[in-house]
Image (cartoon, rainbow, N blue to C red):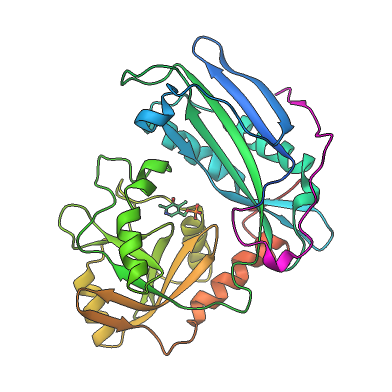
């Protein structure tokens, strides 16, 4: 790819207090853009100063939601180098999403090159305080000016970067999760496995309800029987039941998380039995009652591992563990973040140094 680079003439002031970065509020100096036109393919890859874009109000993305996104991070290691974590997996998932949403395929090497080049240009934006990172948000939107329902013939691929603070400023904190029994997120045959804004729009009502009741996230049940565990808001979910690591199998309605995949690989590497299967909420309640529900944790790029200390289902509130972090949860967090920041051995070859 021949990426043209136009550097900003007015670099922004970088945040000086890295403990106050938060998430998703600050953006770096540059962004990547590339157009797609039917008959011509992807063209005009370019890095330009970060700024507003202008679109026709008739642009298709505004009306029928033909849109996809990805999320990954760049980490600064002890030698000051930038590292990515399994960006090839984001490239593969991009195309799984694109296929479902009739968005043209984006060659995997183009995706990885675009991400890498933009991070190189804005590498000074990768914060260095332990736990901080540069969040990378690639996304594609449909740009035809047309109100008919059909796949767009033109698209824009955009990547923006946002320095983000440490998810856990003072150690891993167990969260409370609301098992949602009214709303559903996705059904098999739908778009649950695709990383697209529509899934999030559909999740907000339940999220607001859970927040109002003091729970930090929603745990979705299957959309047909409302009986089997699917995933958390923006995380996949794992259980340690009687020594085994159990997670819902990918059935089409669950987002195939890269952290999920990494956790499965690491647990197998450690010799754990890992089961990808259906887990009913009844099985969980029974396991909690007989004391075999040993650990519960969510997995996702933002938190890596998010221990769950409390699960609410209808009038039942289950507490997990003794308020402390489960042993496997903590070990997974240390191992995966160690690979990401380059402080631990990487037997899987997941870390990519830029
Ligand atoms: C992105 C996402 C995840 C986590 O995927 P990672 O690749 O591990 O970050 C889980 N569930 C949903 C709905 C997501 O959008």
> Which quadrant would the C terminus be assigned to in this image?
top right
Q: Residue at x 30, y 48 (%)?
A: 253
Quadrant assignment, res 246 = bottom left
Most distant residue in the left direction: 225
Relative placement, left or right, of 290 versus 34 is left
Q: Residue at x 63, y 30 (%)?
A: 110
Q: Residue at x 76, y 65 (%)?
A: 17
Q: Name the spot of residue 142 as percent of width and height, x first.
A: 46, 25
Q: Name the spot of residue 78 as percent of width and height, x first.
A: 81, 63
- Image vertical order of residue 156 relative to residue 123, above or below: above
- Image vertical order of residue 224 relative to residue 232, above or below: above
Q: Name the spot of residue 220 as percent of width and height, x first.
A: 29, 60
Between 243 and 338, the one nearer to me in the picture: 338
Q: Name the spot of residue 9 as percent of width and height, x first.
A: 84, 34
- Image vertical order of residue 261 relative to residue 295, above or below: above
- Span of residues in magenta: 1-25
- Could you tell me if residue 82 is visible in this image? yes
Between 67 and 224, the one nearer to me in the picture: 67
Q: How many marks?
A: 0
User: Looking at the magenta stretch, what is its main secondary structure?
Assistant: loop
Q: Residue at x 66, y 51 (%)?
A: 26
> Which quadrant would the N terminus be assigned to in this image?
top right
Relative placement, left or right, of 39 versus 46 is left
């Amino acid at each position: 790819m021949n990426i043209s680079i136009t550097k900003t003439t007015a670099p922004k002031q970088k945040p000086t207090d890295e403990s106050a970065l938060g998430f998703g509020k600050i953006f770096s100096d540059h962004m990547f853009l590339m157009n797609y036109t039917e008959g011509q393919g992807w063209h005009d890859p370019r890095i330009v100063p970060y700024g507003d874009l202008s679109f026709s109000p008739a642009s298709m993305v505004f009306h029928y939601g033909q849109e996809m996104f990805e999320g990954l991070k760049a980490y600064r290691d002890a030698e000051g180098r930038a590292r990515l974590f399994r960006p090839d997996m984001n490239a593969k998932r991009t195309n799984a999403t694109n296929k479902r949403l009739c968005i043209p395929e984006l060659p995997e090497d183009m995706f990885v090159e675009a991400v890498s080049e933009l991070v190189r240009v804005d590498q000074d934006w990768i914060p260095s305080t332990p736990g901080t990172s540069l969040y990378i948000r690639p996304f594609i939107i449909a740009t035809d000016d047309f109100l008919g329902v059909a796949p767009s013939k033109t698209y824009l691929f955009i990547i923006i970067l946002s320095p983000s603070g440490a998810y856990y400023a003072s150690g891993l904190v167990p969260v409370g999760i609301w098992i949602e029994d009214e709303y559903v997120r996705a059904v098999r045959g739908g778009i649950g496995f695709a990383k697209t804004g529509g899934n999030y729009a559909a999740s907000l009502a339940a999220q607001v309800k859970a927040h109002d009741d003091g729970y930090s996230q929603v745990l979705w049940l299957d959309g047909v029987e409302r009986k089997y565990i699917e995933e958390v808001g923006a995380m996949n979910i794992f259980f340690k039941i009687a020594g085994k690591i159990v997670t819902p199998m990918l059935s089409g309605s669950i987002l195939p998380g890269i952290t999920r995949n990494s956790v499965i690989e690491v647990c197998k590497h450690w010799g754990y039995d890992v089961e990808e299967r259906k887990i009913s909420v009844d099985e969980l309640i029974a396991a909690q009652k007989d004391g075999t529900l040993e650990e519960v944790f969510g997995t996702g790029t933002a938190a890596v591992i998010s221990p769950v200390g409390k699960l609410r289902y209808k009038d039942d509130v289950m507490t997990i563990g003794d308020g402390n972090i489960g042993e496997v949860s903590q070990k997974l967090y240390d191992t995966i973040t160690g690979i990401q920041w380059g402080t631990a051995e990487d037997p899987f070859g997941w870390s990519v140094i830029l």
